[in-house]
């Protein structure tokens, strides 16, 4: 009996990797935090969606840019990092999730003047 061997090559593509960004505390509205990078040559075919509310930040689904939102209170003493989950979806029925972490940079703040 002749054996027939077959080989199945499976290509696993991560559309999205975990990523980290940094933002200074007290950053004003519209400050760009970073752009989420995808592992796909055809970026127009991928939909990127946050899986939770981005409290303090806003996300542009066209450019993948994260910015400080108008209601943000970025304060290192209150919160040193923000963690969000994102879903990337491609037409080829590929889905991928990743964690996006934004670290807050502590800025030295002068103490208030003494009360006289």
Image (tube, rainbow, N blue to C red):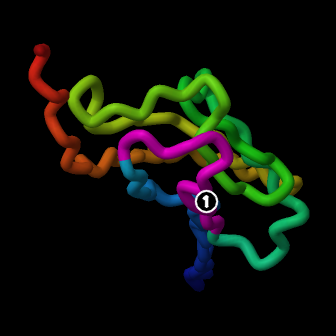
Name the spot of residue 68 as percent of width and height, x first. Answer: 59, 41
Q: As drawn, is 46 to the left or to the right of 80?
A: right
Q: As drawn, is 71 to the left or to the right of 99?
A: right
Name the spot of residue 98 as percent of width and height, x first. Answer: 50, 46
Along the line of sight, which residue is nearer the eye, 34 or 98?
34
Circle 1 Cα neighbour tier, 10 Å, few/some/many (<14 / 14–19 / ≥20):
many
Per the rendered image, the range of residues in magenta is: 25-38
Name the spot of residue 27 as percent of width and height, x first. Answer: 48, 45
Which image quadrant: the N terminus? bottom right
Tell me the SS state at disc 1.
loop
Name the spot of residue 103 as percent of width and height, x first. Answer: 33, 47
User: Residue 54 colored magenta?
Assistant: no
71 vs 89: above or below: above
Residue at 61 percent of width and 72 percent of height: 11
Which image quadrant: the C terminus? top left
Q: As drawn, is 65 to the left or to the right of 107?
A: right
Q: Which residue is mark 1?
A: 36
**Res. 25 in view:** yes
**Res. 93 in view:** no
80 vs 114: above or below: below
Residue lying furthest front in this view? 116
Residue at 73 percent of width and 52 percent of height: 94
18 vs 4: above or below: above
């Amino acid at each position: 009996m002749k054996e027939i061997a077959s080989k199945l090559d499976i290509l696993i593509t991560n559309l999205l990797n975990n990523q980290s960004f940094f933002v200074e505390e007290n950053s004003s509205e519209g400050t760009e935090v970073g752009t989420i990078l995808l592992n796909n040559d055809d970026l127009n075919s991928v939909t990127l969606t946050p899986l939770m509310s981005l409290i303090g930040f806003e996300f542009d689904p066209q450019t993948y840019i994260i910015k400080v939102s108008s209601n943000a209170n970025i304060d290192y003493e209150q919160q040193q990092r923000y963690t969000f989950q994102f879903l990337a979806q491609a037409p080829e029925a590929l889905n991928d999730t990743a964690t996006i972490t934004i670290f807050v940079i502590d800025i030295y703040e002068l103490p208030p003047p003494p009360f006289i």
